[in-house]
Image (cartoon, coloured by chain):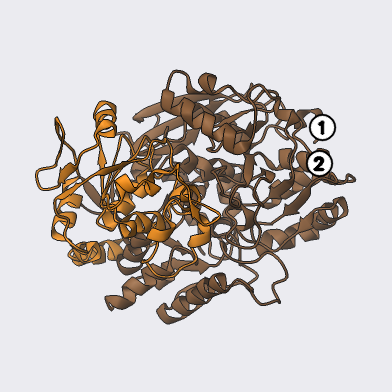
Chain colours: A brown, B orange
Amino acid sequence: MPKTLFEKIWDSHMVVEEDGRSLLYVDRHLVHEVTSPQAFDGLRMNKRTVRRTDLTFATMDHNVPTSDRSLPILDQTSSMQIKALEKNCKEFGITLFDINSPNQGIVHVIGPELGITLPGTTIVCGDSHTSTHGAFGALAFGIGTSDVEHVLATQCIMMEKPKTFEIKIQGKRKNPHAVTAKDIILSIIRKIGTAGGTGTVIEYRGETISELTMEQRMTICNMSIEAGARAGLIAPDEKTYQYLKGRKYSPENYDESVDYWRENLKTDSSAKFDKSFILSAENIVPQVSWGTNPAMTTDVTGTVPFPDEYGRGNPEEQKGAEKALQYMNLKPGMAITDIAIDRVFIGSCTNSRLEDLTEAAKVVQGKQVSAKVRAMVVPGSQLVKKNAEQLGLDKIFKDAGFEWRESGCSMCLGMNPDILAAGERCASTSNRNFEGRQGTGGRTHLVSPVMAAAAAIHGHFIDVRELDLN
Amino acid sequence: MEPFKKIKSIATPLDKVNVDTDQIVPKQFLKLIQRTGFGQYLFYDWRYEKGTPRKDFVLNDPAYANSKILLARDNFGCGSSREHAVWALDDYGFRVVISTSFADIFYNNCFKNGVLPIRVSDDILQKLFSIKSEIEVDLETQSIKADGIQVSFHIEPHWKKILLEGLDDIAVTLLHESEIVRYEKSHKT
């Protein structure tokens, strides 16, 4: 029977099936400091061990300060959580990339760059953005802390089989430097909604996807969870194999592995998906979110919508839009390019990789950050930071007035000192514009790295298609 | 885990769609390293203004004190995978959440903590929102009874068993130890 890529990976990891649920084997378990302490406590309480320390990797990313790492961490509770991870990894024998490691970084940035993320594998992490790893043709799920404990103890996860959802993106973008992967995924979420993918694994397909680089594919898969999906997948191809070649944990018999991946990891041509959605990339323009969830997004050339227009007859959604506009302090009908901003954040597991920084630097080079704006760049990992510095990107950003920071999740969720003050408005390359996400009372507009960089220079949003980015 | 028994209580109506887990428990409270004590932070930014309870937020309405059932709208629990959201609901006293739909990770996290998430139709949810008297939720018979309403709900048999018997799901999985070992022997990872 013809199968989708998802079904092939699912079937090849099934340990046992009962009551319509499957016990799946987990190939890679990534661990961070926020969602793991209670899981390790559970193991201790029940006198259990970690079943496969060789398949479990940890780093600290959510809480870590992005300022000078030689200084002590002032926030006592953050410090406690970081120390707890160190202690737990030592006690249970887990590889940890700690705060001083050259491999430290956001867990979803370091997994691929270390070759821990591999095609055809199952990956879990106590973090919803685990969907990022799907860009490599891995089936990657975000899980809660109880499941973290379950995987530590059993190396398996018990799940009901999700449905399959094909999202086909066709056509060429008119200006691929200005209309980025971020704009593609925001356009998708805007159309299918934040629950459009609930209960499904999305496979992104089509010529637009094939043309994307691996880093761009990660941006797409990363935000699958913002459409409610269990996971996002892209079939691996030559770009995938090229990217992973020679990475620290990539397989030793690499060519053999590639042969296997090439042979086995694609959706059969006659396979059926439970659901389909088709999008043309030709007419996508840069996107800006205006509300308090990622579906509340519009074109940079557009205006802030009227709640009834957004609700399209659904009174609950209309009410949601009214509340969102109140929180965001925006008036319907206002041009997106008239929205003035106070802060800019370039970073997060969505957009903090080398290519994101290179593209943003093109906008910034030789310019100055608006006097009204405070802007920062937080590379996704120490390796991204090092590579960017070798290219001189740090100098471009610093000369323009950006802060250049150490790697971590930073202001994507503000668990470290990088937060918005109440009422501050931020152009952010992160993934969530929920109320208070970047700081209580803070207002987030989700955009691509080039859009954020341009907003920093101009003090408000501009259409980056007007810039020369080639 | 404590076995789940019949729940009878006034239901707290949270009339908002797409409630994300950042609202259920804001990030500043995720730094704790234990599972307990999160109830005080439940819906913190909606519940308090500069530390003072906001009169216009439903959890601060004395009519709903001691409520064990939360009525929510579409796509409840979306966003972050933080299980702290369920720990906060549970610690506050909610044992049941009724909505038209839930986000997947949140839905799963509920069962893991003995909180029962129930999906109902839009029509039924609308009726439940209008009821002021107590609602009874019986897991054994999979039924909701309230003033003029009796409706059954679906639950996966696996979760029903775990909740009713208060089982440790890791121990349940480890009953398959021989199958796990067999898988490990026949697959390289």
Q: CA distance from mark 2 to mark 1?
A: 8 Å
Chain letter behind tag 2 = A
The first of marks 2 and 1 along the sequence is: 2
Image quadrant occupied by the C terminus of chain A: top right
**In this view of the protein, can residue A295 be seen by the observer?**
no
Q: Is residue A380 left or right of residue B124?
A: right
Q: Secondary structure at mark 2?
A: helix
Q: Residue furthest right?
A: A366
Confirm or deny contact between disc 2 and disc 1 (CB under 8 A).
Answer: yes
Residue picked out by circle 2: A363
Residue A90 lies, in percent from the top left, at 47, 80
Residue of label 1: A467
Give the image quarter of residue A104.
bottom right
The amino acid sitting under disc 2 is Val
Q: Is residue A250 above or below residue A212?
A: below
Determine whether B72 is above or below B188 in the image. above
Quadrant the N terminus of chain A occupies: top left
Q: Nearer the viewer, residue A374 or A187?
A: A374
Give the x, y percent position of residue A175: 72, 28
Q: Nearer the viewer, residue A61 or A333?
A: A333
A35 vs A364: above or below: below
Residue A166 visible in rendering: yes
